[in-house]
Amino acid sequence: MGQAITVVGCGVIGLTSAIRLQERGYNVTIITRDLPPKLTSAVAGAYWYGGELATHSSRHRWSSISLETYLQLAKGDYCGVSTFRMLEVFGSRVEEPWYKDLLPFYQRVAPADLPVGYADGYWIEIPIVETPRYLAYLVERFRQGGGQIEQRTISDLHELAHDHANIVNCSGVYARHVAHDNFVYPMRGQVVKVDAPEVKTAFSDDDAFTYILPRKDGVVLGGISQKDNWDLEIDAEVTADILRRCEAVQPEISQAPIIAELVGLRPGRHEVRLETEQLTDGCTVIHNYGHGGIGYTLSWGCAADVVALVEQSH
């Protein structure tokens, strides 16, 4: 049995960190208030995004590691990861994306072929994650590896310090409380999932924060990002606005039945926090939170760095 490590949080960041530590021989337990699907990670549209929404100097490296992992996972239909073609459009000319040579497919769109009102765009093939199925796969993978999940609420990491010498803090937006980090704030998101099997390609307009993501469990329409809004109730006006924007892109969506409306709180921060802290004389914490809206994009890369930090601290 390897050295014991406790991971706080069971979203995509906590699960990937726990799995990578487990694979290195550590004896990992997850402590979490909620289990999937009652987590922000289960609400996410969850497509690989290239890391530009993060400000950390390691964002491209983290994103590249995750991309490589997702492309491997997408080779089999067993965990909810698939690749789709996405049309990404812009209101003004943009540079080529840094990751274009890493993708299975990349093609700039000729100006005449762009939707009306856009000045630039490209087709990319990227991983899109069917979040409930993928999170269930990660939980099962962790448990099959001997991992334990303990469901309870903690209000402060110091509650664990006496009995847990090694903690990885993946508490997302709740790091504001458990780690007393006032730099963390909620970025409230809301999506609409519709039954529209005829939609085969994805769409993203970053400027308007409009996206259409075909998944096997429905087409996810979004989105919105409301800073410092902790409200988890569905906002009917936001739903109507999302539908209006997405129908303008894909008119057939107007006839699609709504499967679900979902709300989640992304963990906003000026920069991802991935570092070691000596919490007490006998307790070391590695913080891994603050990934904003791209936790899926950064997750496997950050998990690799968690392992490196754990091994540096011993």
Image (cartoon, grey):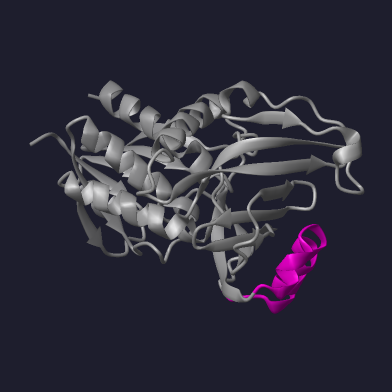
> Looking at the image, is 140 positioned above or below residue 58?
below
Location of residue 248 (image quadrant): bottom right
Residue 79 visible in the snapshot? yes
User: Which of the image's four quarters has the C terminus?
Assistant: top left
The reply to whether residue 279 is in sight is no
Residue closer to the observer: 95 or 169: 95
* Residue depicted at x 37% and y 49%: 79
- The answer to whether residue 273 is above or below residue 265 is above
The image quarter containing residue 188 is bottom right
Near-viewer residue (55 or 116): 116
- Residue 40's spot in the image, x, y percent? 49, 59
Where in the figure is residue 175, as x and y percent of width and height? 45, 51
Q: How many discs appear?
A: 0
In the displayed image of the protein, which residue is found farthest to the front? 198
- Could you tell me which residue is drawn at 41 percent across and 45 percent down? 13
Image side of residue 3 versus residue 139, left or right:
left
In this picture, residue 111 sits left or right of residue 27 = right
Residue occupying the far left of the picture: 1
- Is the stretch drawn in magenta largely helix, strand or loop? helix
Q: Quadrant of the N terminus?
A: top left
Q: Is residue 243 magenta?
A: yes
Q: Quadrant of residue 214?
A: bottom right
- In the rendered image, residue 95 lying in the magenta stretch gets the answer no
Q: In the drawing, does residue 90 fall left or right of residue 280? A: right
Coordinates of residue 181 in the picture (x, y in percent): 50, 48
- Please state the extent of the stretch shown in magenta in the rendering: 233-256
